[in-house]
Image: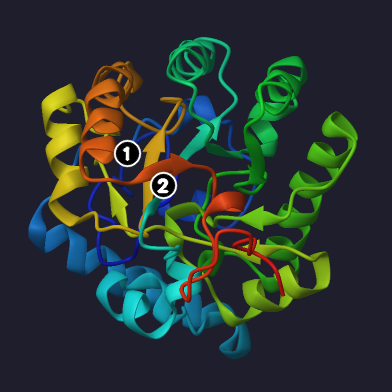
């Protein structure tokens, strides 16, 4: 799952399961990160400042959280990073799997609709369900990396952040027979150090242009649909979640319930739906891979 610093309103940094001191050390199990239900508008800003402040204390070169953290600005200045592709296409992406409790439901629905998507997998989840990771790939979906542990990279030492990416990439390479090409950082927070690590590991970072706020306990199929469509334009990338491992328990059901209507709305607007590999670059081109150099 990924959230920007600006919209980092759903992480309760004071809960029992995820304290400030835990963010920079250790390998928290994703099932303990039930931290999505606190946000207020003021908390959004305070948390962004806290994240940036702690990051700058980690290391100056590592800590410049990129423009990537702020959606409107990154969409204008970094369209490729934001996930903008050809205008007749929408990239459908899911974070936080593979989850044996929920991901199979998404795979069945997508198969019934003849739609392929990009799944950003957590290494800590894939190591528990390697067969499901292979099933995602075998169904024709694109498998990408969401890191190993779901923690804000700016709060980690540059070497620890790099090792997290490498551990996840290597696990997916072992499971799938080839390494992932795309990477989405937890919360959408990139740093100078993370960009350098992506270069070293041959990973292309990509974020999103629209999301459904589907991690919330109060999310409904209608709210997810309406939130996505409130900001989505042709050529955009949609962020949803096929797991509740870092979300409110059972929140994936709202996402699943919203998906048929979302696919219908995309089609009604003349947008083809598919994975990022078919998304093209911001300048268009059906055959140009989104992540081609």
Q: Position of residue 153 (x, y in %)?
A: 56, 63
Q: Nearer the viewer, residue 172 or 229?
A: 229
Q: Residue at x 50, y 58 (%)?
A: 152
Going by the picture, which residue comes out furthest to the bottom? Answer: 60
Q: Position of residue 185 (x, y in %)?
A: 54, 57
* Left or right side of 56 for 25: right
Could you tell me if the residues under marks 1 and 2 are in contact, i.e. CB atoms within 8 Å? yes
Would you name the residue on which mark 1 appears? 15
* Left or right side of 72 for 196: right
Give the image quarter of residue 121: top right
Would you name the residue on which mark 2 appears? 19
Is the residue marked by circle 1 packed among few (<14), some (14-19), or many (20+) residues within 10 Å?
Answer: few
Q: Position of residue 17 (x, y in %)?
A: 42, 34
Rounded to the nearest angstrom, the CA distance separating label 1 from label 2 is 6 Å
From the viewer's perspective, is residue 173 above or below residue 56? above
Q: Nearer the viewer, residue 51 or 22?
A: 51
Query: Can residue 39 be spotted in the picture?
Result: no
Q: Residue 218's mark?
A: none
Q: Residue at x 40, y 43 (%)?
A: 272
- Quarter in which the N terminus is drawn: top left
Q: Of helix, strand and loop, which one carries label 1?
A: loop
Query: Can residue 114 be spotted in the picture?
Result: yes
Is the residue marked by circle 2 packed among few (<14), some (14-19), or many (20+) residues within 10 Å?
Answer: few
Q: Position of residue 34 (x, y in %)?
A: 37, 30
Q: Residue at x 20, y 34 (%)?
A: 224
From the viewer's perspective, is residue 258 above or below residue 7? above
* Left or right side of 167 for 212: left
- Total numbered labels: 2
* Left or right side of 229 for 259: right
């Amino acid at each position: 799952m990924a959230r920007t610093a600006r919209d980092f309103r759903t992480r309760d940094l004071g809960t029992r399961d995820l304290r400030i001191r835990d963010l920079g050390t250790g390998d928290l199990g994703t099932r303990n990160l039930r931290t999505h239900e606190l946000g207020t508008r003021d908390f959004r800003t305070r948390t962004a400042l806290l994240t940036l402040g702690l990051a700058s204390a980690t290391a100056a070169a590592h800590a410049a959280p990129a423009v990537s953290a702020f959606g409107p600005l990154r969409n204008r200045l970094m369209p490729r990073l934001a996930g903008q592709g050809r205008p007749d296409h929408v990239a459908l992406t899911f974070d936080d799997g593979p989850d044996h409790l929920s991901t199979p439901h998404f795979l069945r629905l997508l198969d019934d609709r003849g739609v392929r998507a990009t799944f950003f997998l957590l290494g800590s989840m894939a190591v528990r369900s390697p067969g499901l990771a292979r099933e995602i790939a075998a169904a024709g979906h694109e498998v990408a990396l969401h890191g190993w542990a779901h923690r804000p990279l700016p709060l980690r030492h540059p070497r620890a952040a790099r090792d997290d990416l490498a551990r996840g990439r290597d696990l997916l390479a072992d499971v799938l027979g080839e390494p992932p090409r795309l990477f989405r950082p937890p919360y959408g927070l990139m740093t100078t150090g993370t960009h350098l690590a992506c270069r070293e590991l041959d990973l292309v970072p990509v974020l999103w242009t629209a999301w459904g706020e589907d991690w919330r306990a109060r999310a409904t199929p209608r709210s997810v649909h309406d939130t996505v469509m409130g900001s989505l334009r042709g050529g955009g990338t949609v962020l949803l979640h096929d797991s509740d491992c870092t979300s409110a328990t059972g929140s994936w059901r709202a996402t699943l319930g919203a998906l048929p209507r979302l696919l219908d709305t995309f089609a009604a607007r003349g947008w083809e739906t598919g994975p990022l590999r078919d998304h093209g670059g911001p300048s268009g081109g059906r055959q140009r891979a989104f992540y081609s150099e």
